Amino acid sequence: MSGVVKFLLAALALGAGAVALLAVFQTALVFPRQMVGPAPTLPDGTQNLTLTRPDGTILQGQRIAGRDPARPVILGFGGNAWNAGALALFLHQIAPEHDVVTFHYRGYAPSTGRPSAKALMADAVAVHDLIAPDAPHGMIAVGFSIGSGVAAHLASERDIARVVLVTPFDSLSAVARQLYPFAPVSLLFRHEMNVQAALARSNAEIRLILATRDEVIPPARAEALASAVAQEQVTRLETGHNAIYSHPEFAASLRAALR
């Protein structure tokens, strides 16, 4: 066997091995539960929430009261390594007039269960239905990174006043295809979240905040989503995926989107 043939066979074996690893560990890659930080101390009066799902999964969340009960409730859906308590506190600091509700994704302690895109999206609808009786002025869904897929799905299934998406994408499978062009994503990927299709089915007002130098979500994927909405609904900040939170214009942009 020639050296060239051996090299090609070795390269094929390595490629097949890499694809196999991506297939086996994709849930851990999409939902890195071990990277979630500790919960912060939440304000006095924070209400602990519990929701039991039909499969026995127990979701734990929190509700921080706002200063103005006539405002819509903000439902927050964080990134794949964001503690839901930290997200609740962040949104409370951004919009202290609003009640804020966040839940730990299934599989993210203290919630139980195993995460998947389909399950998280279904859980979001159940969270909405739990909160709806105590949200007479409606709700705003806010999704960050992978939480964009969860928030957009909710907006397609329920009557949401507004959906605000930060560092979003058009579809998670499109992100995977761009990040792993050597892998047969269409055959292997199990965690699709199609944000663009969900928003097309929604009557909610839409606001997008994009990071133009995003190193996690390829900017092309965010721009594909932005191209499907009116440009006055889109804010672009010259920053990266995680650095966006320290951008001097981010807090004001998020507050404006919530208004």
Image (cartoon, helix red, strand yellow):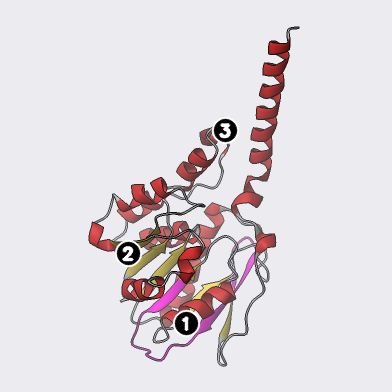
Q: Which residue is mark 1?
A: 92
* Total marks placed: 3
Q: Are marks 2 and 3 in contact (CB under 8 Å)?
A: no
Q: Is residue 253 left or right of residue 10?
A: left
Q: Is residue 172 above or below residue 202?
A: above
Image vertical order of residue 81 relative to residue 257, above or below:
above
The numbered mark at residue 183 is: 3
- The reply to whether dot 1 and dot 2 touch (C-beta < 8 Å) is no
Counting from the top left corner in percent of width and height, residue 148 is at: 44, 59
Determine the residue positioned at 48% across, 40% down. Answer: 178
Name the image quarter holding the C terminus: bottom left
- Looking at the rendering, which quadrant does residue 154 occupy? bottom left
Asked which secondary structure carries label 3, the reply is loop
Q: Which residue lies under the disc numbered 2?
A: 207
For the record, the magenta segment spans 51-75
Which residue is at 56% across, 40% downward? 189
Q: Earlier in the sequence, mark 2 or mark 3?
A: 3
* Amino acid at circle 1: His
**Around disc 1, counting alpha carbons within 10 Å, would you say few (fewer than 14), some (14 to 19), or many (20 or more)?**
many
Q: Amino acid at mark 2?
A: Arg
Q: Residue furthest right?
A: 1
Q: Residue at x 63, y 60 (%)?
A: 55
